């Protein structure tokens, strides 16, 4: 979400951002639209990253989807929006059939909390140029980790990151990520950083990527939980019939 100076005034309110995030039904997206083994996401860092443990999130862990929507309606009312004052936003996505399906689904889901979403589709270069210029309200984005450690995700949302297109700036978050670079054990800092993201909600996590591989039944030794997708022939073997 564009929470910077050029973004819509409504998205500067964390209550609105939370309401938008709470209303998206991730189970529908992964089970009915994507159908590729993806997992619903309620936080930014991929669940399979080494040693990462996300904090407990009340809206994710202790509410079902109906309760999330009710909470979202309360937050929107507190922020001054409702049936008599709907919120109009634009959602931008880059060309892809799956992205289009998710964008349409999200726009329909958000109608439950009186948010009218206009969809904008651009080719990748134009899409990223518009994001870098903060010329959007909400935009589809994703990240694949460069290495197997939580900072490969969390660093993106620091104020000094070149990928922070939404211009989310939070001093406490910046300090945690800077301190993590020299901490003996950075994991508690990563967990706290995720708590700040859940409270401020500058992004709407939807799902974590997964790989789908077709492996012959007689092949064993495949490192199925290696998120770096590194396979060594010495570890693989074929079983006899």
Image (cartoon, rainbow, N blue to C red):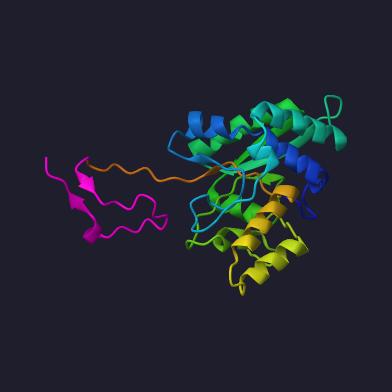
Residue lying furthest left: 241
Q: Is residue 236 magenta?
A: yes
Q: Is residue 159 visible?
A: no
Decide which of 72, 61 is in the foreground and name it.
Answer: 61
Residue lying furthest bottom: 182
Decide which of 135, 38 is in the foreground and name it.
Answer: 38
Q: Is residue 63 left or right of residue 82?
A: left
Q: Is residue 65 left or right of residue 220?
A: right
Above/below status of 224 relative to 114? below
User: Residue at 63% across / 64% down in the picture?
Assistant: 162
User: Residue at 63% across / 42% down in the picture?
Assistant: 92
Q: Quadrant of the C terminus?
A: top left
Main secondary structure of the magenta stretch: loop
Above/below status of 57 relative to 104? below
Above/below status of 70 relative to 206? above
User: Residue at 52% across / 62% down in the picture?
Assistant: 149
Q: Is residue 136 visible?
A: yes
- Provide residue 214's location: percent of width, then percent of height: 29, 41
- Provide residue 133's location: percent of width, then percent of height: 69, 57
- Tell me which corner region of the image, top left, top right, bottom left or bottom right, holds residue 93: top right
Q: Is residue 192 magenta?
A: no
Numbered range of the magenta stretch: 217-241
- Tell me which corner region of the image, top left, top right, bottom left or bottom right, holds residue 108: top right
- Provide residue 155's location: percent of width, then percent of height: 62, 63
């Amino acid at each position: 979400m564009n929470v910077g100076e050029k973004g819509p005034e409504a998205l500067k309110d964390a209550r609105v951002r939370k309401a938008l995030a709470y209303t998206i039904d991730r189970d529908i997206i992964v089970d009915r639209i994507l159908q590729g083994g993806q997992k619903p996401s309620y936080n930014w860092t991929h669940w399979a990253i080494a040693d990462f443990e996300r904090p407990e999130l009340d809206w994710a862990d202790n509410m079902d989807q109906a309760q999330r929507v009710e909470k979202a309606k309360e937050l929107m009312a507190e922020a001054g929006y409702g049936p008599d004052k709907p919120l109009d936003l634009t959602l931008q996505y880059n060309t892809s059939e799956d992205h289009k399906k998710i964008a349409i689904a999200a726009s329909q889901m958000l109608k439950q909390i009186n948010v009218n979403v206009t969809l904008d589709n651009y080719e990748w270069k134009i899409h990223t140029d518009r994001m870098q210029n903060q010329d959007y309200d909400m935009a589809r984005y994703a990240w694949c980790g460069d290495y197997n450690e939580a900072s490969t995700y969390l660093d993106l949302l620091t104020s000094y990151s070149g990928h922070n297109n939404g211009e989310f700036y939070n001093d406490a978050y910046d300090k945690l990520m800077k301190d993590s670079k020299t901490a003996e054990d950075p994991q508690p800092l990563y967990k706290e950083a995720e708590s700040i993201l859940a409270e401020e909600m500058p992004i709407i996590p939807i799902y974590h990527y997964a790989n789908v591989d077709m492996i012959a039944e007689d092949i064993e030794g495949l490192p199925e939980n290696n998120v770096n997708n590194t396979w060594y022939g010495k570890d693989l073997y074929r079983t006899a019939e």
